[in-house]
Image (tube, rainbow, N blue to C red):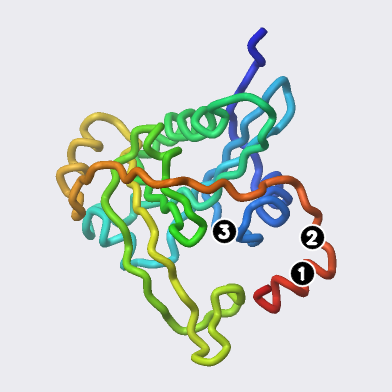
Amino acid sequence: MAQVMRVGNILKDECKDWFLNKHYLRRMPPISHCYGLYVEGHLEGVVSFGKPVSDHLCRGICGDDFKSKVFELNRLVVNEIGQKNLASCLIGNSLRALKKHNLIIVSYADTMMSHCGYIYQATNWIYTGKTKARTDPFSKGHPRHCNETTKRQNRSAKHRYVYFAGDRRFKRQARRALNYPVLDYPKEKNKRYDADYKPITQEVLFGIERGI
C-alpha cells in the first residue's frame, strides 16, 4: 500500500534542527518560505526559499524590473526512508504553492560536492550554465572555505537552475527577460552526501569553526 504523503508550510524553527544537524553546510540560511514533507504524518523532509543577499544576483537573472521577484531555493534535506521521489515531491509541491506569489526561483548545484542538479532536472527547471569558480574576501561564518594564507574564501563553480513560479502572464514576461541562455541539462556522475542525523557535539562545533 502506498504511503500517504503531504507537503505543507512549516515554521522556520521547525527547519533549524534539519539545517544545523543534517545539511552539509551546517548553518541557517535566510528564510522567507519553508515547506515540510510529511509521510504517514511524520516530517521526512524540509525545503526553504529566501531572498538572496546579493543584489547583483537578483538583477542578473532577469534585470532590474524583476529583481524583487528573485528568490533562492537555499536548502533541501530529505530523509532516505526507502521510498523514491520524495525530494521531487517536496520541491514540486512547494513550487506550486509559490505560484501565487509570482516568483523567479534560482538554485545551485555545487560541483565541489559533486552535485549535478538532477533533482532540478526532474522538476523541470531551466538550466542556464555554470558559475565561475572564484575567491572573495573572507567573511565570518564561512570558515571551511577560508584560505588561512590569503584570508580569502573559495567559491566553487556551481550549476545554475532557474524556475518561474507564477501565472502564465508572469512566466511569459519573466522568461522573455531572462539574461542567461537556456542550455541542455548537464549529465555527470552525481554524489550523494551522508544526510543521516548527527547531533552537533562540542567536538563537531570545534571542527566546523576550524574549517575541518
Among numbered discs 1 and 2, the one appearing first in the sequence: 2
Instruction: Kindly state the secondary structure of the residue where label 1 is placed.
Output: helix
Residue contact at pointers 1 and 2, CB within 8 angstroms: yes
List the residue tagged with mark 3.
29
Residue type at numbered disc 2: Ile
Q: Looking at this rendering, what residue extends furthest in the left direction?
A: 176
Looking at the image, residue 52 lies above or below residue 83: below
Residue contact at pointers 1 and 3, CB within 8 angstroms: no
Question: What's the residue at 40%, 32% (across, down)?
Answer: 122
**In the shown orientation, is residue 19 left or right of residue 60?**
right
Instruction: Kindly state the secondary structure of the residue where label 3 is placed.
Output: loop
- Rendered-image quadrant of the N terminus: top right
> Where is residue 211, by image quadrant?
bottom right
**In the shown orientation, is residue 8 left or right of residue 112?**
right
Residue type at numbered disc 1: Leu
CA–CA distance in space, label 3 to label 2 = 17 Å
List the residue tagged with mark 1.
205
Among numbered discs 1 and 3, the one appearing first in the sequence: 3
Dot 3 alpha-carbon crowd within 10 angstroms: few under 14, some 14 to 19, many 20 or more? some
Question: What's the residue at 53%, 27% (across, down)?
Answer: 85
Question: What's the residue at 61%, 44% (across, down)?
Answer: 77
Residue contact at pointers 3 and 2, CB within 8 angstroms: no
Dot 1 alpha-carbon crowd within 10 angstroms: few under 14, some 14 to 19, many 20 or more? few
Nearer the camera: disc 3 or disc 2: 2
